[in-house]
Amino acid sequence: MNILLTGRILGALLLFLATALLIPVPFSLWYDDGAALALLAAATTSLAAGAVLFLNCRSNKELSLREGFAIVSFGWLFYAFFGALPYVISGAIPSYLDAVFETMSGFTTTGSTILVNIERLPESLLFWRALTHWLGGMGIIVLSLAILPMLGVGGMQLFKAEVPGPTTDRLKPRIQDTAKLLWGVYVLLTAAETLLLMYGGMNFFEAICHSFATLATGGFSTRNASVAAFDSPYIDWVIIVFMFLAGINFSLHYHALRGRFQEYRRNEEFLAYVGITLVVTIVLTFLTLDTGHGSLATSLRDSAFQTVSILTTTGFGTADYELWPVLAQYLLVFLMFIGGCAGSTGGGMKVARILLLFKHAQVSVFRLVHPRAVRLVKLGATPVDREVMQSILGFFALFMGIFVAASFMLAATGLDLVSAAAAVIATLSNIGPGLGSVGPTDNFSHVSDPGKGILIFCMLAGRLELFTVLVLFFPSFWRK
Amino acid sequence: MNILLTGRILGALLLFLATALLIPVPFSLWYDDGAALALLAAATTSLAAGAVLFLNCRSNKELSLREGFAIVSFGWLFYAFFGALPYVISGAIPSYLDAVFETMSGFTTTGSTILVNIERLPESLLFWRALTHWLGGMGIIVLSLAILPMLGVGGMQLFKAEVPGPTTDRLKPRIQDTAKLLWGVYVLLTAAETLLLMYGGMNFFEAICHSFATLATGGFSTRNASVAAFDSPYIDWVIIVFMFLAGINFSLHYHALRGRFQEYRRNEEFLAYVGITLVVTIVLTFLTLDTGHGSLATSLRDSAFQTVSILTTTGFGTADYELWPVLAQYLLVFLMFIGGCAGSTGGGMKVARILLLFKHAQVSVFRLVHPRAVRLVKLGATPVDREVMQSILGFFALFMGIFVAASFMLAATGLDLVSAAAAVIATLSNIGPGLGSVGPTDNFSHVSDPGKGILIFCMLAGRLELFTVLVLFFPSFWRK
């Protein structure tokens, strides 16, 4: 691996982080919340570290696969390490490990928190928390639609963005061009949600923080009670719609903005995503009808909110689903494994992978009966070749393997069975809240330090489609 | 599908079942337990049904794949339906569904019971219960080493018995020859265990019942407290050793009896199986040291017993592991997914598949970094081709899919999360007891009727390597 080239790019990323750390400063001055100096100190530290790396590492070599893996994994890790500084310097989160947990949870768009009282945080740090989500989401869009397909991770080559670059004569759109177009969509949707939330009575600060957390399918709120704190059906529905949009492949949105709405209808993953959302919402509505409030409208709203919040792996809450019937809870756990669409900011295994697993099972059974027949698995009209199908099966096996192993290790730190498994899936799928002692009304502060370490790993591995992180643990990766 | 040919063979199987139903009659007469007439009535019914099928269905055609699938699945189903009759006719188990559950649990070597008070059953029916295990085990050995490899189910082609037929000039050993040799080993081990248990103080009836349940990795005991009732370290250790032997590929035992002991050492699956057993036993010994009894010898014995009992999917109990620390319980849950070796009477996903999944993950990661390198997954010295690897990955995905879906459906019938998931894995892996309300000191009587139906399906599907049963649900299977 070319360490100099990797170092230079990581340096550049830290310089960008330093700039990002300055964005919350105006909020700090406006609210006079006393965190401005902490932010400036963190920005300076990132600037210094970034400059040292950037200026000392030079290389004329081209980027290869290995540097790609290292830059992505260490990029997220560096962001968590340096992005945690404002919390620690300001004293808002005294433990550095807790701060790294919170920041990793931000940049991986997970939304699990170790904060017992969120509202005690200075406004500028709440904004920073939301911003880590939003920047993480930007990273994920490019990663899943441009970088991972190139690296060939877990079948992601299927989901390479078919967004043309601005100059149509170039055959291969470059990463930068694709990124800019998709980020345009991302910014537009964020702005639209912010305005709609302000129209519903939120102030600018809360509106933008919640929009950041929605579009990134993150789930950090500025309130202890999450979205329930606003107690407004209008706000609930706005957030439901935007969470739902954030869970869709962003290249479809791009096409739609260009007037090609038929792309949604043609996309099999999107149709499955709509189907799951509708079916689960309807089932949950009936299951929760006689638990508490009673009104059909409330049941429908709470059910739609929780379905979309968990399927898209956002993790916002309007209802304590641990008070729902067991079956309803189980349905939600089911959703936790699925996640959003490929190419969205959502986590989890992705709807497309689950869909392909089902189709593969069907074809396997067919082949048993007709050993000589040739029948390929297709996604929409695209045949999925065996290599990709094997990657997807391997991804599933690895995902379940990590889920079981990490749950086991977390249980070893003293958590009960349900809480341990729920904490792992909540972080591995980048959702946020789980069940049991890490449920929607609880937080992760009580998890032991080794436990937090395991969950930080889960967030990172889950967000980067597992293989990207795991290659780093293989000695052969580091050899010449 | 050739229904006539299938019918004829199923008829022959029922005639065999009728004979088997007569075996417990001497026990009934000896103990004067009043169940002799019920057994005779059941045998007559099986005889009649078998004769009708056998005499009316004639076909000159050769067996094809489709008939193979149908005969295996319906064979087990018919055995559960007709094998349940003695319980119902004698009034020992009044509900026919319960009796089918108990019999399916027997023939699939699961060991889950709906009996609240086992000791109230007539001796001859307790013997029948153990006999269903033993006959099921015989079926499984042939199925997994001779039939399923031919049908190409879930990568089982890897485990085709390399046991030569008695006439060495024939290149392809026939199923019958293979079966006879392996059954010889099975009978020999059963006889050895029976004698050793009688030496330890059990009477002939209890010794043979427990030997049947051990060699089949079934788990039905004649006592409410399972093996704990005998309170004898000697008996515990005898059963540990024979459960361990029953979890090993029977073709290895065959080679050993021929003096080729080195076959064990050469078999990678066997080595992994030994490794898992040792590591888990040692960890559990330390974890359970300070819970209750305190003595190292007791901890070691209970830990070895529970590890082997669950890994081999037997399900006998000497300790209530629900009183053990959470971590210990989680380790056991972990084992529930693994199961015994391929070609043993054990259920679960099988050690070889889990081993290959790990190797596949390793090779996948290697390929990401070295896209042009060729590296195959190997089991021992045998390279595993892509087709087989894909079958195994597909098997894993399907296993986890059925586990999640069935748990969800079972939770819908009113069970709590942990009990529902534990009941499903306990039946799908053919173990017996689970956790929660279906734990080692509980039983399955409280599960609702639809819930019992789901679990009967899980036992059958798990025992027949999933695909064998699932093909029957595809319309194309039934078409010409």
Image (cartoon, coloured by chain):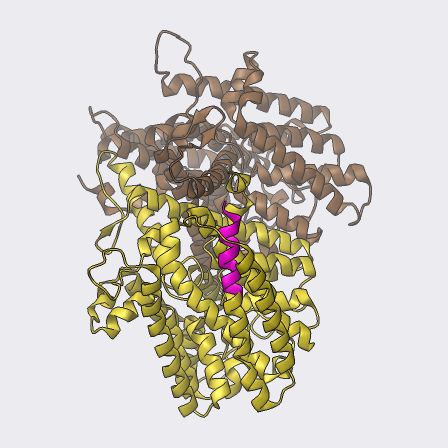
Chain colours: A brown, B yellow
Tally the numbered discs.
0
Of A449 and B273, nearer the camera is B273
- Percent of width and height locating residue A364: 44, 41
Residue at 52 percent across and 69 percent down: it is: B17
In-image side of A434 versus B141 (left or right) = right
Q: Where is residue B332 in the image (x, y as percent from the top left)?
A: 46, 66
- Write the residue at 82% across / 45% down: A294
Name the residue rendered at 50%, 76% in the picture. B317
- Residue B13 colored magenta? yes
Secondary structure mostly taken by the magenta-highlighted segment of the chain: helix
Residue A415 appears at what percent x and percent y? 53, 61
**Residue A7 in view:** no
Residue B338 left/right relative to A106: left
Visible residue check, residue B259: yes
Frontmost residue, B84 versus B275: B84
Specify the segment rendered in magenta: B1-14
Q: Is residue B314 magenta?
A: no
In the displayed structure, would residue A301 be above or below residue B153? above
Q: In this view, does B79 lie to the left or right of A165?
A: right
For residue B276, which quarter of the picture? bottom left
Residue found at the very far left of the displayed protein: A480
Q: In this view, does B312 lie above or below A467?
A: below
Horizontal and vertical percent for residue A173? Answer: 37, 16
Q: Nearer the viewer, residue A448 or A352?
A: A352
Residue B338 figure quarter: bottom left
Residue in front for this viewpoint, B213 or A436: B213
